Amino acid sequence: MAVFQEPPRQGSMGVGVGTSVGVSESVQRGRQLVDALYRDVKSEYVSPIEGDPSCNPPALESEQGSFRFIDLFAGIGGIRLGFESVGGKCVFTSEWDKFAQATYRANFGDDHEIAGDIRSVTDLDSVPAFDVLLAGFPCQPFSIAGVSKKNALGQDHGFHCKTQGTLFFEVARFIEHHQPAAFLLENVKNLVTHDKGRTFSVIRETLEEELGYTIDWRVIDAKGWVPQHRERIFIAGFRKNSDFSFDDLEVPDRNNGPKLRTILHSANGNEDAELPYTEGPNARVSDKYTLTEHLWGYLQGYAEKHRAAGNGFGFGLVGMDDTARTLSARYYKDGSEILIRQRGNRPPRRLTPRECARLMGFDSSDRTHKIPVSDTQAYKQFGNAVVVPVVEAVARHMKPFFIEQVESKYARLSGAGLPLIADG
């Protein structure tokens, strides 16, 4: 059996922000050679050195991308859009929710099937070779009870024990097996303090000490990109030592960000009507998005009750020149966190799903997000999503640090002629 044997590893190939990463002639030759050889033997591939990531089948460049990535806990593809914007090609997707899958398919029309529950992906060798792992995994507590006893008995320990049964374990499992050049994980900002800091401590220990990655993280507010206060933590990791730092990421001034008028329906004929969201010659917002008098009265009374008790609860009533609160997955229930003022004595209204697509950055000047699901499902999907322009900025910031690793590998393979060795 023929197997790959990569040349000896080189030193760290980290580069600084702004470094040129153009594809050299040797890199292109290496990719062509890798493509031809990998195509011939990939079905019989066996790593000659157990656990040596340098012997993994190399990721191949496609016509659509300069690097390959996988999209875990994909939702409706917000993180994917960010990395496609810097030249990436998605080769594997996992998302369990059937409604999110429908939206994902409508917008990407992939050449690969969407894997459902990530826990059902037991054969990691069946996952195509990739360079970057992306995952917006849910936040769950870890149980550390019994770790010392299991260690003494020679049973699974480390992240195999501490994170078992959580969805972060699935992320760690993919990273351990494929050892990509880089990864980006996204979560709610409270991940750092979740379970009194124990959750984040286990995540750091797993990524840095057990999996051997250099990581950095930052809580980023999307307010500088879109008219919404939305804070999320991003954790970037690199297989080789890297000078990457989120401190260098250019973040627009959150105090001078866009206002809601940039995403609201104009209702003056400047945009075409889009049923069921807008209607008529002026594309006015459909009446169904206006709160009933009963619901509006209930929300006001509920807010007053909590204010009197000193709880600070209240709905978010905003106008054209305001910034919205965080859009949540519960928005379909009553819309209370973002209510749009209307003229006269009319009760406020919810955002339409199209306005949510704009608020989350899925819609842009050159992209209109398809929404093939009900309003309820659309609100849940956008409430669970990332703000796309934020991920685009993070992807631009990360790329110089991982693309050098990816391309240097092809260059070394080209220079060494990618030797093959026979197995037995």
Image (cartoon, rainbow, N blue to C red):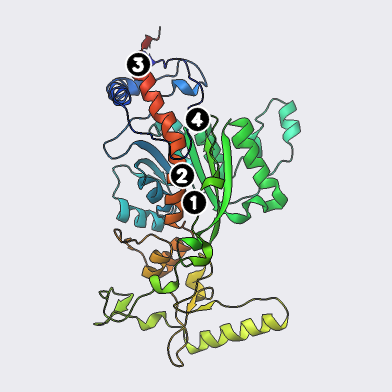
Q: Residue at x 44, y 81 (%)?
A: 349
Q: Nearer the viewer, residue 123 or 328?
A: 328
Give the answer, above or below, for where 394 lies relative to 223.
Answer: above
The quadrant in which the C terminus is found is top left
Q: So how many labels did they put on this image?
A: 4
Q: Which numbered mark, 1 or 2, is in the foreground of this view?
A: 1
What is the three-letter code of the residue carrying label 4?
His
Q: Which residue is mark 1?
A: 250
Q: Is residue 165 left or right of residue 20?
A: right
Report if the CB atoms under discs 4 and 3 are less than 8 Å apart. Answer: no
- The 10 Å Cα crowd at callout 4, few under 14, some 14 to 19, many 20 or more, is some
Q: Which numbered mark, 3 or 1, is in the foreground of this view?
A: 1
Q: Which numbered mark, 2 or 4, is in the foreground of this view?
A: 2
Label whose residue precedes the other's in the sequence (2 or 3): 2
Report if the CB atoms under discs 1 and 2 are less than 8 Å apart. Answer: yes
Label whose residue precedes the other's in the sequence (1 or 2): 1
What is the three-letter code of the residue carrying label 2?
His
Q: Which residue is mark 2?
A: 397
Q: Which residue is mark 3?
A: 415
